[in-house]
Amino acid sequence: MSDHGPAKGIKRWLYTTNHKDIGTMYLIFSLVMFFIGGSMALVIRTELMQPGLQFVHPEFFNQMTTMHALIMVFGAVMPAFVGLANWMIPLMIGAPDMALPRMNNWSFWILPVAFGILLSTLFMPGGAPASGWTMYPPLVLQTGDAFPFLIFSVHLMGISSIMGAINIIVTILNMRAPDMWLLKMPMFVWTWLITAYLLIAVMPVLAGAVTMLLTDQFFGTSFFLAAGGGDPVMFQHIFWFFGHPEVYIMILPAFGVVSEIIPTFSRKPLFGHDSMVYAASSIAFLSFIVWAHHMFTVGMPLTGQLFFMFATMLIAVPTGVKIFNWVGTMWRGSLTFETPMLFALAFVFLFTIGGFSGVMLAMVPSDIQYHDSYFVVAHFHYVLVPGSIFSLFAAAYFWLPKWTGHMYNETAGKWHFWLSTFFVNLTFFPMHFLGLAGMPRRIPDYSTQFADFNWMASVGAIGFGLSQLIFVYVLLTCKKGEKATDRVWDAPKGLEWTVPSPAPYHTFDTPPVKRVAEEAFE
Amino acid sequence: MTRNQRTALYLAAVAVTFYLGFILMGVMRS
């Protein structure tokens, strides 16, 4: 079987059931979406470069904020992590492929359809959805012809994610190499197992919420319409019951990536592996009981405010365990600073800044001041851009030699890192000050006292966007790089480094024997 | 049915339960 290669031409990609092919398609798709969503961010930042309305109509501005968020969350970050899962989980646990390969093909190919539908709404009467990615009623019900297309595309994204999550859980639970008991699994596999459970629990909740929006609009129900006896605030509760675990869906696999990279470039085993597992599990559990911290200002009983405030602040404990363990891994390690390590280190520093502003937002009295301001925008972009997206770059540089068989251009990688890090801070750090000074989010124009920081943020955003072209250059020139060895790095741990570089089309047709598994980990 | 299919079916049942359960909650509340 192992000499059985891929089919030729377009059929290879349309009909493939190979986890590496599907992983590659997920990764390329997410990169394309990253650039589409990024272009929308640049429309937003160009308009906000100076006070006054310059380039776009306010209606179109709102469409851009909504589409930017939907595309980045569901089209860029989530599929990128699913792509990494597809590529790496079978290699890391010694499985020949994902457990349900045909469903895997379907999970991927639903996505281009879903985003084709979503992007087509830009050309419809009334334009694309403009209510924000949160889709709060009654505002979202004012969407034009795009409304049912929005709902349908969200359903498709949900189906794709659920099928992907089912595949990942079944693969991890049923197809591990004989000696790989659960607590011996690499952290990336662990964090993905936990993430997949989160996905199965909350994507159906989002689907239920948007189904109710659909029936409110077209079938005469009043789930969220006050005039018919419904409750618009109930949508917010249901949406954030999905939305908060969704935040962790986008960060837990990032924790996994960083937990693979820091030990490799510290030349030490991960400090506190088991405590990392328990910390990730605790974060996942807590993510289900904190949703209402997104809606303190809609009004709730004092006990409700206190519960959600303290539950939210509790998340800082397992997150602190993780940060401590990464620092503990580096402590007295033999550190080197290749591009993946640089991105992972920046992740630890900059994600922590987003974590701190998260604790500030968790406090009810201060949140009532910060709510719906640029402080919130600064907070979640710090956890998502130098958080999730930096971890994706780290993962790409880390595993690219294993995927392609060639080393990437290290100089270009370092330029990509330093420019991205400089510009990401120039973009998002001033937004803290804008928010504290009272600038609301989701507005195309603002008062003149906000002009300077907005100008800085826009320059940063344009610089960050252009810096990403270096990443494309790295990918395109990777094949010209020197040949990668099988282990690639100095002393990486894990089964994926026991297969040749590039990884053959079929790996682990027979499960790795105990000796190989032990050498990979001990 | 293989073991993998059986596990997948359990997980799919969980997802469907969450989907219908939350809609049912919406029906009860409105």
Image: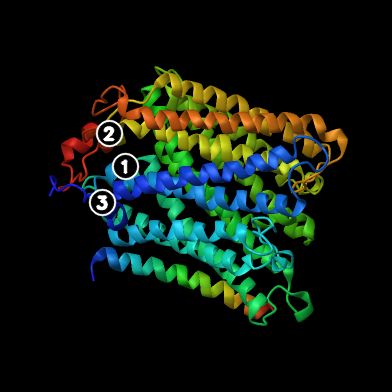
**Chain of residue at mark 2:** A
Is there one chain holding both mark 3 and mark 1? yes
Chain label for disc 1? A
Query: Could you tell me the amino acid type at mark 2?
Result: Phe
- Residue A353 on image: x %, y %: 64, 33
User: 10 Å neighbourhood of mark 3: few (<14), some, or many (≥20)?
Assistant: many
Judging by the rendered image, the residue that carries numbered circle 2 is A521
Which residue is nearer to you in this view: A215 or A292? A215
Residue A69: image tag: none
Q: Residues at badges 3 and 1 in contact (C-beta under 8 Å)?
A: no
Mark 3 or mark 1, whichever is nearer to me = 3
Residue A445 point in image, percent of width and height: 81, 44
* Mark 2 touches mark 1? (CB < 8 Å): yes
Instruction: Label 2, secondary structure: give it.
Output: helix
The residues tagged by marks 2 and 1 sit, at their Cα atoms, a distance apart of: 9 Å
Q: Mark 3 points at which residue?
A: A97
Q: Which of marks 2 and 3 is nearer the N terminus?
A: 3
In this rendering, the answer to whether A36 lies above or below A432 is below
What x and y, as percent, mark residue A246?
Answer: 55, 53
Camera-side residue of A332 and A344: A344
> Which residue is at 56% across, 47% downward?
A72
Q: Left or right: A296 with respect to A480? A: right
Is residue A136 rendered to the left or right of residue A343?
Answer: right
Q: Is residue A482 left or right of A273 when viewed as pictured?
A: left
Q: Which amino acid does label 3 sit on?
A: Asp
